[in-house]
Image (cartoon, helix red, strand yellow):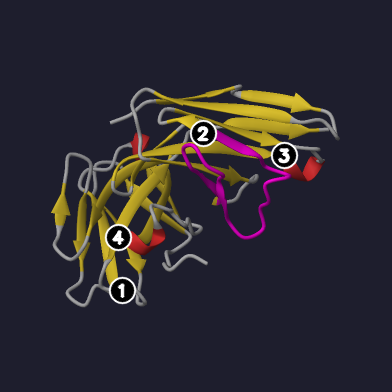
Amino acid sequence: DAKTTQPPSMDCAEGRAANLPCNHSTISGNEYVYWYRQIHSQGPQYIIHGLKNNETNEMASLIITEDRKSSTLILPHATLRDTAVYYCIVSGSSNTGKLIFGQGTTLQVKP
Amino acid sequence: SAVISQKPSRDICQRGTSLTIQCQVDSQVTMMFWYRQQPGQSLTLIATANQGSEATYESGFVIDKFPISRPNLTFSTLTVSNMSPEDSSIYLCSGELSWNEQFFGPGTRLTVL
């Protein structure tokens, strides 16, 4: 079973920031938080990952709470092309690279 | 980054037959994986394709039904054997370049009649 909990769906206005929450209250010390997204009819795409510090790249920012029990993926200026299913995944060295996907959050960006 | 291609992109097969799906990566990857995505569902990991040895299967998946080969660091195949309509899914492969950053192929859409 997935170790994360995400809302099934969210809406966001185009040009606004999209904030996608994820709960991972059972995360262990050596596990990272990963975010992937799957645009319709495509394979999943890696977005970002982090351990305990906040991370930012050209696609998004990842904010991890101090207790590491939850995180938020931020798309700073959502576009229509960001409409996708977003998966929050917890994984560490004990998983030998395996990614266990939950149901994810369907983000609908609206004009 | 890595580019992953899969063949075929889609197929329609008859019950009882087998289909082999190919996965090619444009660079050497440490790990390769096969996933299944049933209609309207999330991805389910089938197995880890190990180079030069038998694949490691997840609970609910067996080698007789889903034999996997990985002869080198850039190529793997998944065979769906003795197919039934319940095997109709999208099958995706992925490769891991750096630790846990996986790149996915576009998927193979399989329909079994």
Of the 4 image quadrants, the one containing the C terminus of chain B is top right
Q: Residue at x 37, y 26 (%)?
A: B3
Q: Nearer the viewer, mark 4 or mark 2?
A: 2
Q: In this view, does B41 lie above or below B90?
A: below
- Identify the chain of the residue marked 4, using the numbered disc in the image: A
For disc 1, the marked residue is: A28
Q: Tag 1: Cα neighbours inside 10 Å, few (<14), some, or many (≥20)?
A: few
- The magenta segment: B45-69
Which residue bears the numbered disc 3? B88
Chain letter for mark 1: A
* Residue linked to disc 2: B70
Dots 2 and 3 on the same chain: yes
Any part of residue A111 in sight: no
Q: Identify whether A28 is placed above or below B48.
A: below
Q: Is residue A42 left or right of residue A81?
A: right
Does the CB distance between marks 1 and 2 fall below 8 Å? no
Which chain does tag 2 point to? B
Secondary structure of the residue carrying tag 3 is loop
Front position among marks 3 and 1:
1
Residue B113 in view, yes or no = yes
Q: Specify the label residue B13 is tagged with.
A: none
Identity, as a three-letter code, of the amino acid under mark 2: Arg
Q: Is the residue under label 4 in contact with that under label 3 (CB below 8 Å)?
A: no
Q: How many labels does the image show?
A: 4
Q: Which residue lies under the disc numbered 4?
A: A33
Instruction: List x then y, in percent, for residue A65.
Output: 20, 71
Instruction: Evaluate whether label 4 is on the same chain as label 1.
Output: yes
In the structure shown, which secondary structural element does the residue marked by tag 1 occupy? Answer: loop
Identity, as a three-letter code, of the amino acid under mark 4: Val
Q: Marks 3 and 2: in contact by CB < 8 Å?
A: no
Q: Which amino acid does label 3 sit on?
A: Ser
